[in-house]
Amino acid sequence: MLTTLTLVATIMIAGAPAAVVFIPFAMLTGNATPLYNVSMGIVRLAFRLARIRVAVEGLERVPAHTACIFMANHVSNLDPPALFPHIPGRTSAFLKSSLMKIPVLGYGLKLGEFVPVNREGRVGSAIESVAAARRVLAKGFHITTFVEGTRSQDGRMLPFKKGPFYLANEAGAPCVPVSIFGTETMMAKGSMRVKPGMAHIVFHEPLDPADFASREELMDAVRASIAAGLPEWMRG
């Protein structure tokens, strides 16, 4: 319980003054990068104080000065805050549209050009989300997606959603597979309790969508890369 309280309290105490200063700055200038950088710094601090460590491998494989699509597995609500601060530059991400309705946080996410996804499965909404993500990539920012679409209940990989691979084919951006493990023991699906521990993040070699004859082949290659960085029991 102490870890949970430390994590939440740090984000709230540090986040409130940051929001007061940097949200208006982003509104006035149209530049959300300072807001993003400060937010990532707060997350790093919160993790450190909560005794959540993050071990990162393969960062040298990420293409420099190139907008990429980071494709990760998903085992815990701790995955995004563990991953995002370690992505070079600024990333947007696909997220549940309901998060955009949370006061202050939702507005900050909108300023950061995060892409809401409607879980109803409507084709029109999916097309809109892919189009919004393409605009983000065109500005030089990354997109991060958890390709299973939801957290795994037991840590094993689930089937992938097709949306991120439509985006990859349309945008032609490098796809960087990312393996995440360790967070499943610190915050299980359905639980609000956070435990201290070590999160592991592995960045794999980027994949060029143009090298694959179909979305399915690209999907299989991404899955194989992610699986290679996970403990055997998580590979599905």
Image (cartoon, rainbow, N blue to C red):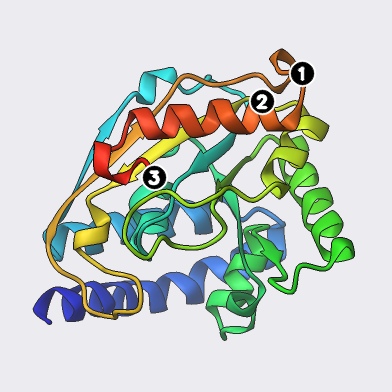
7 in relation to 32, above or below: below
Nearer-N-terminus badge (3/2): 2
Residue ID for mark 1: 213
Residue ID for mark 2: 217
Nearer-N-terminus badge (1/3): 1
209 vs 46, nearest the viewer: 209
In 3D space, how far apart are the residues under numbered discs 3 and 2 (Cα atoms)?
18 Å
Q: Residue 122: give x, y in percent of width and height.
A: 83, 68
182 vs 31, nearest the viewer: 182
> Contact, CB < 8 Å: mark 1 with mark 2?
yes
Residue at the image point whose x is 57% and y is 86% from the top = 103
> Contact, CB < 8 Å: mark 1 with mark 3?
no
The amino acid type, in three-letter code, at marker 3 is Gly
In 3D space, how far apart are the residues under numbered discs 1 and 3 (Cα atoms)?
25 Å
Q: Residue 90: give x, y in percent of width and height.
A: 54, 43
The amino acid type, in three-letter code, at marker 2 is Glu
Residue ID for mark 3: 236
Q: Which mark is residue 67?
A: none
